[in-house]
Amino acid sequence: MDEQDHLVEYLADRDVACVSCGYNLRGIRGGRCPECNEELVLRVGLAEPRLGSVIAFLAGVWCCAGTTFAVLAFFLILSLYFDDWPPLRYWMPAILGFAIAAPTAAWVGTRGGRAWLRQRGDKMRRLLVVGAWLLFFGCIASITLMTMMM
């Protein structure tokens, strides 16, 4: 009996979702998901996978997204209150930070995004985490400088 036979036997009477697309694999006949055509393997996994890098990355991009959103809201409220819109260059750091951080955080928050991040090597995950936090601190620094120039 080869690995594919073990996989088919295991999935014969179990409800298991495809890791890629979520399709229920109960009763499949081959080693590929019928929905997304990804190859399937039967293996032992961790009960509690290491999520430190995922959490650290998400914390960085969500901090950036939240802070830039708050700054944009603050600028908008001040602009409406004083009926005076500052030049776009003052808004750009917050707009760019939010435009990069919010979709990135939303994607990494999905199953596919987390899987993509976990599949990177240790060095690449560290670089991505550092990059997320540099994005956050870069946005804060540029927003601070732009605000001081107003």
Image: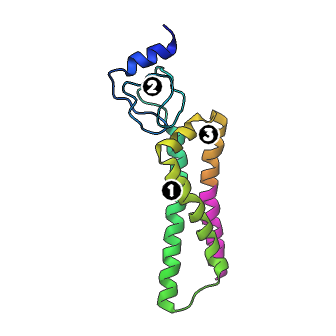
Q: Which mark is residue 62?
A: 1
Numbered range of the magenta stretch: 135-150
- Rendered residue at 46%/24% (across/down): 45
Query: Which residue, given by chain and number where applicable, does mark 3 sit on?
Result: 125
- Return the residue at label 2: 46
Q: Is residue 146 magenta?
A: yes
> Please, is residue 24 above or below residue 141 in the view?
above
Q: How many neighbours does mark 3 have within 10 angstroms: few (below 14), some (14-19), or many (20 or more)?
A: some
Give residue 111's position: percent from left, percent from top.
47, 42
Q: Is residue 134 above or below residue 39?
A: below
Q: Earlier in the sequence, mark 2 or mark 3?
A: 2
Q: How many marks?
A: 3
Q: Amino acid at mark 2?
A: Leu
Q: Are marks 1 and 3 in contact (CB under 8 Å)?
A: no
Q: Are marks 2 and 3 in contact (CB under 8 Å)?
A: no
User: Which callout, 1 or 3, points at the residue further toward the start of the chain?
Assistant: 1
- Locate the C terminus by quadrant: bottom right
Mark sitting on residue 78: none
**Residue 145: x percent and y percent?**
66, 73
Front one among 108 and 54: 108
**Which residue is at the far bottom?**
83
Residue 86 image offset from top left, x and y in percent: 61, 85
Q: Is residue 135 above or below residue 1?
A: below
User: Disc 3 on helix, strand or loop?
Assistant: helix
Q: Amino acid at mark 3?
A: Arg
Q: Of 8 and 121, which appears nearest the observer?
A: 8
Give the spatial CA distance, label 2 vs label 1: 27 Å
Rendering colour mode? rainbow
Q: Residue at x 40, y 29 (%)?
A: 25
Q: Nearer the viewer, residue 62 or 148?
A: 62
